[in-house]
Amino acid sequence: MLEKNTAYDVLTAALSQGGRFAEIFIEENKKNSISVVNGKVERALSGIDFGLGLRIFVKDKIIYTYTNDLSYDNLIKCAKEAASAVSGNEKKNVIEFNRIDYRKSDIHSPRIMPESIEKKTIADMLKQASEAAFGYDKLISQTVMGCMDSNQHICVINSEGLWVNDNRVRTRASLSAVASRDNEKQTGYFGPGALKGFELFDDIDLNKIAEEAARSAVTMLNAKNCPSGKMSVVLDNGFGGVIFHEACGHGLEASAVSKKASVFADKIGEKIASDKVTAIDDGTIAHSWGSINVDDEGIKTRKNILIENGILKCYMADRFNAEKLGILPTGSSRRESYKFIPVSRMTNTYIAPGNDKKEDIIKNTQYGIYAKYMGGGSVNTASGEFNFAVNEAYIIRNGKICEPVRGATLIGKGSEILNEIDMVSDNLALSEGMCGASSGSIPVDVGQPMLRVREITVGGRG
């Protein structure tokens, strides 16, 4: 994507005014998407994002610029303009490149490239899923089914001699069903995806997932309003992990910790959670939606144990914020595209399996809420305060799951909820999502086994 001599000259120009580190990030990302509404194709889009980002470190600041004109003259011009904002006196080193190509040993290699599949085949698949959702119940009034794929090639080159190439092929479906009665509406939604090609659809049954979206919507349409107050909450496995991701995970990113904008700053080695809690961020899980061979600084991803038996062990760190904290990068630097500066971000973040059984968790809960499917919410990273919607919930009474309730919200603080987790099952599952932050929107997995929060504030309508 760039000649060796050009890369050398660009980095040299970037460091010409005293910067201490320079980095080139090149991206070519081919994207496709199809959307089917009520069984009819609404849109089919294809596009390519292509460009280069140039980053310079000087003292405790970052200079960043980007362009989609990769001609030699323009790149040198951009590098010199960026360097002109630098005032430093770092010694310049001779750059010797060490090229690494992760495409040759990619554990996530796709089997069926999405672009090899005809658009009509994809559209027909989505239409069948729509029919499955409509066929579940007459209360289903609308369906929106989609499929997207991306084929992203990146190249990271820096002034320390790193030269890394990698490819990332992702495929995802989105399945939404709306149930309506009079003026009331409820929605069921699922978005299965993976770091795979079109073989994803050999592993999942879209029709069954669409039916499940319809079932969830109809169930909530027929549900009573949720009561409110402090009570036990059982969070099911999979997307229940979104609470840890949002309320705690972001506070363990070095980009927040280095600014003291996290309740977990300066707490390495301290007990911050129940003994039942071991939390992990692992970007190496084969074919997982949030996985990557290397992060967006070219550093190999790894399994980072964030919390072990309640003890805070490490933060997720990019190069710049790792330097500020005096730690090593953890392969956690990510960005949406070349237009964004990379920062510390999660990959596949989950609470590890425990020794309890899910049947015992329900049986040992006299009264509370069973949160089967979680929705979105809002979080203050600095304080850890959160507010999350529950998409599908049930009352637990005398150790049994009883009637469905709707309108439930979970309210609390991440640092407090960690200590309230008193039972953790062994049925770990991961679920796919998109995470938005200062470096854009990126694919992540959240996850956990079924677990119980002993007491949390539940907001409801009853």
Image (spheres, helix red, strand yellow):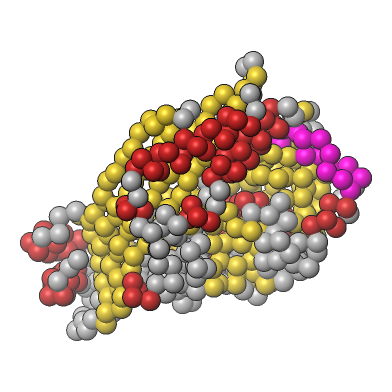
Does any portion of residue 189 appear in the rendered image? no
Residue 8 is situated, as x and y percent measured from the top left of the image, at: 16, 75
Q: Name the residue at the top extreme.
A: 182
Give the quadrant of the C terminus: top right
Does any portion of residue 154 appear in the rendered image? yes
Q: Name the residue at the left extreme.
A: 73
In terms of image quadrants, where is residue 273?
bottom right
Seen at 50% across and 37% down, the residue is: 128
Q: Is residue 33 left or right of residue 223?
A: left
Q: Nearer the viewer, residue 220 or 91?
A: 220
Seen at 20% across and 61% down, the residue is: 82
Seen at 44% across and 59% down, the residue is: 196
Residue 408 is situated, as x and y percent measured from the top left of the image, at: 71, 36
Q: Is residue 243 above or below residue 42?
A: below
Give the quadrant of the N terminus: bottom left
Q: Nearer the viewer, residue 439 or 58?
A: 439
Q: Which residues are magenta?
A: 394-409
Q: Is residue 390 above or below residue 416?
A: above
Q: Nearer the viewer, residue 30 or 207?
A: 207
Seen at 71% across and 45% down, the residue is: 372
In terms of image quadrants, where is residue 101?
bottom left
Residue 379 lies in magenta, yes or no?
A: no
Residue 403 lies in magenta, yes or no?
A: yes
Q: Is residue 161 above or below residue 421?
A: below
Q: Is residue 58 above or below residue 421?
A: below
